[in-house]
Amino acid sequence: MHTKTLKALSDALSAGELSSQELTQHFLDRIKQHDPGVNSFITVTEEQALAQAKAADEQRAAGNATALTGVPIAHKDIFCTQGVKTSCASKMLDNFIAPYNATVVEKMNDAGIVTLGKTNMDEFAMGSSNETSFYGPVKNPWSTDHVPGGSSGGSAAAVAARLAPAATGTDTGGSIRQPASLCGITGLKPTYGRVSRWGMIAFASSLDQAGPMTQTAEDAALLMNAMAGFDPKDSTSTDIEVPDYTADLNQPLNGLRIGLPKQFFEDGLDAEVGKVVQEAIALYEKLGATLVDIELPNTHLSIPAYYVVAPAEASSNLSRFDGVRFGYRCKDPADLEDLYKRSRGEGFGEEVKRRIMIGTYALSAGYYDAYYLKAQKVRRLIKNDFDEAFKSVDVIMGPTSPNAGFKLGEKASDPVSMYLSDIYTISVNMAGLPGISIPAGLSNRLPVGLQIIGNYFDEARLLNVAHRYQQETDWHAQVPAAFA
Amino acid sequence: MALDKEDVIKIAHLARLQVADSEVEATTERLSSILGLIEQLQAAPTDGVEPMAHPTDAVQRLREDVVTETNHREEYQQIAPATEEGLYLVPKVIE
């Protein structure tokens, strides 16, 4: 039952072959049995899940179900869930019971989706390895001495180990696509503004975007139908119509123009990963696509620009954690300044503090023009590169990550080397474009992801292009042996 | 650009973060290496380039000036570290 896709489970529920209560119990049992070795969940909401499942079964019986009524998923612990701990994997929010639901959670509840629990992540979504979590690192189900990627590492590992059929994630610099790549699942980062950010704990507000993490592109399309859409409560939400993302999944790829950026295949790309990606691209050629060499000449500037913009926005967003209204408060503060400094000093982990300090420095008097304004100008250059490329291609392809994953602890003491591993994903956030990572092979028994980047609001095409590949291959259906 | 320990102490104060004396040196080193990465920006030619604040250059939406929020004080104060009579409590600020 647990190896089935969300689509197959939805069909089985519709056909009356199984109930949501059976399905939900099955996944709760799997979490209990397997999660101690993976650590992909921070909170399991067993009671609520079973109550939601019961209600879903009643809705099905009454004949007013959606396609997703009764399917269970997990939410990244960055989404506020009313009455349930929402920690963002930080000591700062270890005691935080969210008083409301994020719009994404609300929409999924409305669709009848069951929530199994909240998944582990890098603290405040700051990291690429899931090692910065207050609740300990997540293990990669393919090899438990390797990282699952981050920051949505718990969501990726839970789906890879088939502890949940799907999960939500968020992506500020690659946090959906990179863990999807490292764990061998499908992960879509939609266009900035496509999915509401309301109730999603903010990291870098001009970059953050939520999206689905699933076994297949078809499943991602189903979840996008429930997640996407305008939200007046998110001031940067875009008010354009949401298509049925499942409608064009089977469109043929004849004549599809695939751009291959020279900068994505240069030094720094692992040879094995490069080979897997080239094989995937060759398959697309067989499916009728044409390949076009393109240039994204400012790619090398995306990481330096990101490490100004994201920390600057984070330093502002995270100023709300002050020990006064919610979250952690230090013991016996001597005065107000001591309350602020120790609550924040004790409540935040090392990486979060580093980024707050970098952001504070970049925004401090006299440095704004040299850092934040400069980074925003470079951001425009990065976007212009993509705009130019999309004049002659429909999608852009390349690796998601330069390596097929690394060992726990390998990069933990060197933040800069960790940052550099996001080279192929960060420019997509800087431009605000949609991107998807799909499993395309293995390197030393670890999954390798193919990244497909689309033009603004072209998620349906990305899902179509990904789905056609998954019709021809079975990488997405492979499960690590210990969890089969 | 390399920071010195004094810079780090000043930044930590601005960010209202306690950094223990024993951590200042390691923090200085790591922040300096991150700033070294960021320095690559300075070489990029950006004369006449419009700064980008929003990927699709959207502007702030306006809405009718009417009350949209309902009162949530009690629920929100339930999760506060210390409250009294509807107020959030902090250490004494005015002597």
Image (cartoon, coloured by chain):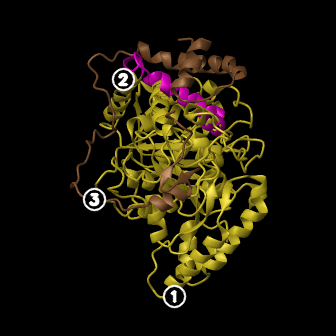
Chain colours: A yellow, B brown
Question: At which x and y percent is residue A386?
Answer: 36, 34
Going 67% across and 55% down the picture, which residue do you hit? A42
Question: At which x and y percent is residue A277?
Answer: 56, 39
Residue labelled with disc 1 = A61
Going 51% across and 75% down the picture, which residue do you hit? A69
Tell me if label 1 and label 3 are in contact, CB under 8 Å: no
Whether residue A402 appears in this view of the structure is no
- Choose mark 3 or mark 2, whichever is in front: 3
Question: At which x and y percent is residue A302?
Answer: 46, 27
Is residue A358 on the magenta stretch?
yes
- Which residue lies most toward the bottom here? A62
Question: At which x and y percent is residue A33?
Answer: 78, 64
Q: Amino acid at mark 3?
A: Val
Residue labelled with disc 2 = A373
Which of the 4 quarters of the picture holds residue A22? bottom right
Which of the 4 quarters of the picture holds residue A331? top right
- Residue span colored magenta: A343-371
Going 73% across and 54% down the picture, which residue do you hit? A480
Bin the neighbour count of mark 1 within 10 Å (Cα to Cα): few under 14, some 14-19, many 20 and up: few
Residue A352 is left or right of residue A391, and the answer is right
